[in-house]
Image (cartoon, rainbow, N blue to C red):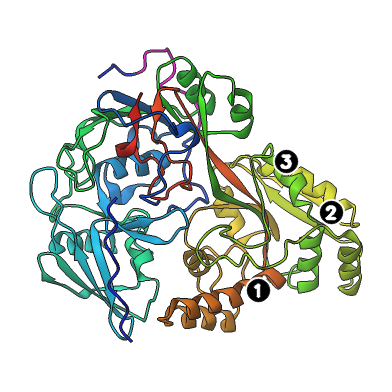
Amino acid sequence: MNSPRIPLYDSRSPGLRRRGFLAAAGGVAGLGALTATGCAGSGPAGAAGEGDGKPRRGGRLRAAFAGGGASETLDPHLANLFADAARAKALFDKLADYGADLSARPRLAAAWEPGAGLDRWKVTLREAVFHDGRPVTAEDVLYSYRRIADPGRAFRAKASLEPIDLAASRALDPRTVEFVLKRPTAEFPNVLAAFGAYIVPRGAQDFDGEPVGSGPFRFVSFAPGRSAVFRRNEDYWDGAPYLDEVEFVVANEESARINALLGGQVEYAHELNPATARAHEGKGHVQVVRLRNSVMQSFAMKTDRPPFDDRRVREAFFLMADRRELVDGALSGTGEIGNDLFGKGYEYYAADLPQREQDLDRAKALLRQAGAERLKVTLDTSPVAAGFTEAASIFRDQAAKAGVTVEIRTGGKDSYWRDILDSGTLCSYRSGAMPIEAHISQRLLTGSTTNATKWHHKDFDALYRQAQSTRDKRERAAVYARMQRRLYAEGGFLVWGFADWIIGTARTVRGVAAGAPANSLDWARFDKVWLA
């Protein structure tokens, strides 16, 4: 049975002068455990200006992000920070990107079609041009992917492109690529949407001089660690931006970003914390945009070592947690409670499973059965992410009610993510938006390199392979549902909540999508923003 062809989805001021703003102190605010992953149809909402009339053209929007200092680059294949990703999105395009439900949506790809065995995919490109007037071709796509896959380079999307046999893949004509895969892959469009998988002109290597992409804005200037200015691309395939220019300015401290917004030095402040949002929301000075379900908040139990190698202990910990108290206390109430599964609201999420509630009596009974009545565990945490240390303290008190002693060990920001991957038994953990399929492949298979819970089960791996080789989407969804039921019953992630990603804007800013998780298509979509 041949799958139908996927339809086309169409969808000037000086830098900041306040002393110390651009040189705000603090460490690099990177993605941490967030993994990047939009929906052209989500539209403006809330702070985006519903009822504010038609979009206007003109003006420069100044957007403040945490940055990476003097080492920053505009090479889209090296994008790692949120600032990198936002700048890359302005200058370049990917073949696909993620919708609000984290399903893949075509971008430079007009259509994709699998072969009978799901190990060959034909991708048809839309008519698009680079900033220098050259058309985007199949050879540009293959060059870009081969550059990313270079074994001598550390490009972010390399692991995501691993299923592709790039030596065997080929251009069938200027606008058609045939991708040959190493194994059947039903979710191959997710590969096309991978974070950092941008298409660049064939032969491009220097991106910090005057980079050429096919994105909605053209390069004007770039000062690493300080600012970047881009101008409207009138020839953009998805329609020219409303703004004349967008300027990305660097402010590593959250306090610097909100103060610049309040002082009129920027119109967009990325990544505000819940307390800041609560202090300013509804006061009339700024608009607060909450990107729902952007960040999974959890505790990760290592299932390959005591005490969490006993599934009864893991279930007891699930039942100790008061998720509402954790969301209210650690996230200032700005989020949704979790149900011990990743991807709430995303494609394939098992929403039919009953919401788990705190049950201390049942938790105590399970611990007795496991011979762990006076259990003591160490919980590793760090101020590396908002809410981590607060959630650790709250959970310590919740566990005490079940007779469990939780000792908190606070690690440093610089090495936390590396330290917790293999060491310890219980830790604070978070993840940004990605497809549920990607979460499984990256974190829950025996060979996954970021398997923080050490979930190693060959039969679970086999279910994943079955899902990936199942052409019918409903049948594939049934396999994913089966996998999630098992994780719900005995997995290693205690998912207590999903945090909002919070953005502040000036009252004049319109068109900021409120339905797009961080790092999906409509996040930082400055080509759809305008100034009222």
Residues in magenta, as a range: 16-26
Q: Position of residue 411 (x, y in %)?
A: 65, 44
User: Mark 2: which amino acid?
Assistant: Ala
Q: Position of residue 253 (x, y in %)?
A: 51, 27
Q: Main secondary structure of the magenta part?
A: loop
| Label 1: which secondary element | helix
Kindly identify which numbered label has been placed on residue 485: 1
> Earlier along the polypeptide chain: callout 2 or callout 3?
3
Instruction: Give the labeled residue for mark 2.
Output: 399
Image quadrant in which you'd find residue 3: bottom left
Residue 152 appears in the rendering:
no
Magenta-span inclusion, residue 5: no
| Label 2: which secondary element | helix
Q: 57 and 489: which one is in front?
A: 57
Residue 43 appears in the rendering:
yes
Q: Is residue 528 above or below residue 168?
A: above
Magenta-span inclusion, residue 23: yes
| Label 3: which secondary element | helix
* Residue at 54%, 74% in the rendered image: 480
> Earlier along the polypeptide chain: callout 2 or callout 1?
2
* Residue at 34%, 34% in the rendered image: 529
Q: Is residue 415 left or right of residue 24?
A: right
Q: Is residue 159 left or right of residue 329?
A: left
